[in-house]
Image (cartoon, rainbow, N blue to C red):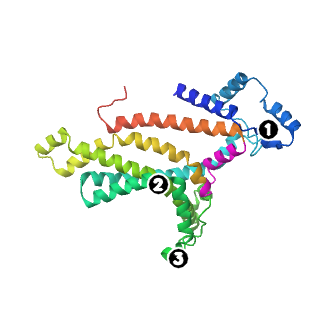
Amino acid sequence: MVPVTITGMTIVFMVIRLGPIDPAAAIVGLNNPEGIARIREQLGLTQPLWQQYIEFMVDLLTFDLGQSWVIARGTPAYELILIYAPRTIWLGIWSVLIAIVIGIPLGFYAGLNPNTGGDYFASFGGIIWRAMPNFWLAIILVAVLSQSQELFGFSWESWIVETNIVTPPDLSFFSEPMGLLTNTSAWTNGLIGALKAVAPAALVLGSASMGNEMRIGRTAVLETINSNYVETARAKGVPERAIVWKHVFRNALIPLVPIITGEAFLLIGGSVVVEVVFAINGLGYLFYTAIQNADLPLVGSITFIFILVLVATNVLQDFLYTLIDPRIGYE
């Protein structure tokens, strides 16, 4: 974990320090050379590169994320991340659920029914969903939903609760947990509205993962169902339902663990393009804005958090193996 984190942040430092972006010019403008020189001095950009690197790494490894230079100058990066992170987490949760709840069952169904119409349909659909770029699918979905009245006979914006197609989810209902007891209608409408606001973006983000898990799940089931221990169980007279649930499904999940955990990081981390298209205003949008405005501390802080999430996800993946595969132990 430690060398991965240090190596990742070293690469980030080199990219943001040696790249073409200049935070001083972003703050005072290109036509003010004296102001640029003064700001560069204040930000410590005139120090030797090795000294900047040491300060950068020490601050991050001690979780001193610093302050924003450009977007909200003087505001701690922690505060900005805490403001934007809940929307990305909300989007990531539903993206992962869409991929798991739809992709894995369809993959297992295709594997249990090979060379049938359902198998061909699921396999072809998985390839199509996997091949469609997120940015293209996001733009197409916005166009379709904006014409839902003409295409489907109902308006997406006014369906169930009033929401815009391109809008950040309102998560304020989470700050009032007792509202579910005192005002059920308002709390429920807030939940439905937040779900509806994030649903198109979650579908776009989850679609590629859904197709991938469908294909891997189908292959894993086919390999497992033709293995020797399954044939032995059948020869002993074990019912087919017990074979499927006890042997096939559990062992077919083993190759899916790295797929699910790896894609969960990407989804929870958010897609910068998808968040921008749907105006989710999460960490992806904050990261995009920070890069545009050369807000180097904010770029480094968000990347550092993403690296920590990735490393933690990999550790979680190892523990999941011990739950699914009895051949693997904690030791």
Q: Residue 70, located in which quarter of the rendered image? A: top right
Residue ID at (77%, 30%): 45
Instruction: Give the mark toward the camera: 1 or 2.
Output: 2
| The magenta segment | 276-293
Residue ID at (50%, 42%): 265
Q: Residue 220, located in which quarter of the rendered image? A: top left
Q: Earlier in the sequence, mark 1 or mark 2?
A: 1
Instruction: Give the mark toward the camera: 3 or 2.
Output: 2
| Main secondary-structure element of the magenta-colored stretch | helix
Magenta segment includes 289: yes
Residue that mark 3 sits on: 150
> Measured from the top left, where is residue 140 in percent x and y?
53, 62
Could you give the CA–CA distance between mark 3 and mark 2, rounded to whole angstroms? 25 Å
Residue that mark 1 sits on: 24
Q: Which of 124 and 122 is in front in this view?
A: 124
Depicted 211 relative to depicted 181: above or below? above
Circle number at residue 132: 2
Could you give the CA–CA distance between mark 1 and mark 3, rounded to whole angstroms? 50 Å
Residue ID at (40%, 39%): 258
Q: Nearer the viewer, residue 306 or 273?
A: 273
Magenta segment includes 116: no
- Other residues around mark 3 within 10 Å, as few (<14) / some (14–19) / many (≥20): few
- Element under disc 1: helix
Q: Is residue 220 left or right of residue 87?
A: left
Q: Nearer the viewer, residue 296 or 329?
A: 296
The residue lying furthest to the right in this view is: 34
- Element under disc 3: helix
Q: Which of marks 1 and 3 is nearer the N terminus?
A: 1
> Measured from the top left, where is residue 3 in percent x and y?
54, 25
Q: In this view, does 7 lie to the left or right of 221?
A: right
Could you give the CA–CA distance between mark 1 and mark 2, rounded to whole angstroms? 39 Å
The answer to the question of whether label 1 and label 2 lie on touching residues, with beta carbons closer than 8 A, is: no
